[in-house]
Amino acid sequence: MLEIKNLHVDLEEEDKAILKGVNLTVEAGKVHAIMGPNGSGKSTLSYVLSGRGGYRVTQGSATLDGADLLAMEPEERAAAGLFLAFQYPVEIPGVGNMTFLRTAVNAQRKARGEEEISAADFLKLVREKAKTLRIDAEMLKRPVNVGFSGGEKKRNEILQMAMLSPRMCILDETDSGLDVDAMKLVAEGVNALRDENRGFLVITHYQRLLDHIVPDVVHIMADGRIIRTGGPELALEVEKNGYADLLAEEA
């Protein structure tokens, strides 16, 4: 599904290497988690895959279902089935949540050669998805993320993901700034989307999120590379002992 081979990436402004040979394959139906100390390249990886500017790929490749992600514009990556839930979702004053969601859904349907969803069908679908995430009707009427709490912004991101139904979901530190109850709600929304045709890449600092979104595979990233891969027990090891021992083994 998602296949990353020997990916090297520089930060353009500083001409600084951030990713230094990332190799990663996420299979359909699987949840992979990436953990690692600050500055290890976790968020950079998510940005590069989604097409954010400011980064220069110097080596390697990244494909989704065999298609070259790195050759696509950001909107083409989204239409191909890639979704990124941001660590810090932005506010969009003047753009209603419902308008934003329907426009995004129909833009992707058009890119895939499908008919636009009708207003009635859209309303039925968004209400169904919002109910699962305990997003009330008032939130749907407000401008995108404007005046939302941290938990509301993250739930709104998961609502977008549920509406767009992507093939590959990347969650960049979705647990950041969430209390326990909000994190459980977000996790429930993610788990409701897990199926055999969809892959997840969950970037997090903390085991606590992985208590609720149990991964199939855990990767540890440091200094722009994946230095260790294991099962859920690897996250528990990091929670207990930190990264020092793993980093020492790589030194």
Image (cartoon, rainbow, N blue to C red):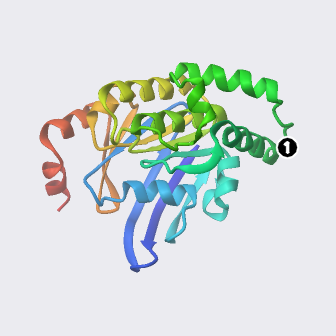
Q: Nearer the viewer, residue 188 or 93?
A: 93
Quadrant holding the N terminus: top right
Which residue is located at x 44 percent, y 55 percent? 23
Q: Secondary structure at mark 1?
A: loop
Local packing at callout 1 (Cα closer than 10 Å; few below 14, some 14-19, many 20+) is few
Q: Quadrant of the C terminus?
A: bottom left
Residue 214 in view, yes or no: no
Q: Residue at x 67, y 39 (%)?
A: 101
Tell me if I can see residue 32 in this picture: yes
Q: Residue at x 48, y 48 (%)?
A: 89
Residue 225 pos. (x, y %): 34, 59
Q: Nearer the viewer, residue 137 or 72?
A: 137
Q: Which residue is mark 1?
A: 113
Between 107 and 22, the one lying in front of the other is 107
- Quarter location, residue 28: top right
> Is residue 186 found left or right of 236 in the rendered image?
right
Q: Is residue 10 left or right of residue 117?
A: left
Q: Is residue 88 above or below residue 74?
A: above
Percent x, y for residue 2? 55, 47
Vertical side of 173 occupied by 130: above or below: above
Q: Residue at x 42, y 60 (%)?
A: 44
> Where is residue 8 drawn, in percent x and y?
44, 67
In the visual, does 70 lie left or right of 114?
left
| Residue type indicated by callout 1 | Gly
Q: Which of the 4 quarters of the picture holds residue 51?
A: bottom right
Residue 229 spot, x, y in % from top left: 32, 43
User: In the figure, residue 45 lies in which quadrant?
Assistant: bottom left
Residue placed most toward the observer, 219 or 92: 92
In this rendering, the answer to whether 181 lies above or below 207 is above
Q: How many marks?
A: 1
